[in-house]
Amino acid sequence: LCLTSTQLGSSGVALLADALGPGSPLQELVLQDNGLGSAGAKHVAALLGNGGAPLRSLNVWHNGLGDEGATVIAQALRENVTLEVLKLGFNDLSDDGADKLAEALETN
């Protein structure tokens, strides 16, 4: 499902996360350039966490997730067993946010 530049924002991704669950066949989700911010990252994390859609590929490029968003996504990645591709470029991450993601991916 490609939703690039659709101006979803955090409220739109919240609705999407509510609609998609373990029974969803969705394996690829592109949310690039939607202004999700750290609030939207929490809903993205819900999609990745236990009980979320069985995503294999997630693209959240250019969403201003920041370190706070990276942290909540990293926490969800620790329990995710299906994701194979994660695209996070241009999200204002510092070394701290990148380190948290790297640590989570080591256990994923």
Image: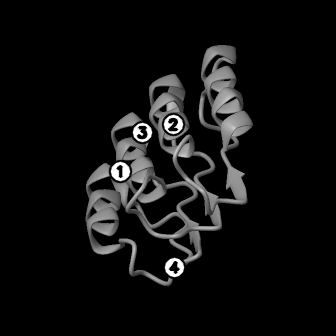
Residue for badge 2: 64
Residue for badge 1: 43
> Is there a contact, CB below 8 Å, between mark 3 and mark 4?
no
Tell me the number on the disc at residue 37.
3
- Label 3: which secondary element: helix
- Label 4: which secondary element: loop
Q: Nearer the viewer, mark 2 or mark 4?
A: 4
Residue 55 shown left or right of residue 84 in the figure: left
Measured from the top left, where is residue 86 in percent x and y? 68, 53
Measured from the top left, where is residue 41 in percent x and y? 42, 43
Q: Amino acid at mark 2?
A: Gly
Measured from the top left, where is residue 30 in percent x and y? 58, 66
Q: Amino acid at mark 1?
A: His
Residue for badge 4: 26
Give the alpha-carbon distance from disc 2 to disc 1, as whole Å.
Answer: 14 Å
First reached walking from the N terminus: tag 2 or tag 4: 4
Residue 75 shown left or right of residue 97 in the figure: left
First reached walking from the N terminus: tag 3 or tag 4: 4
User: Few, some or many C-alpha atoms within 10 Å of disc 1 (few <14, some 14-19, many ≥20)?
Assistant: many
Residue at 36%, 73% (x, y): give it.
Answer: 20
> Is there a contact, CB below 8 Å, between mark 3 and mark 1?
no
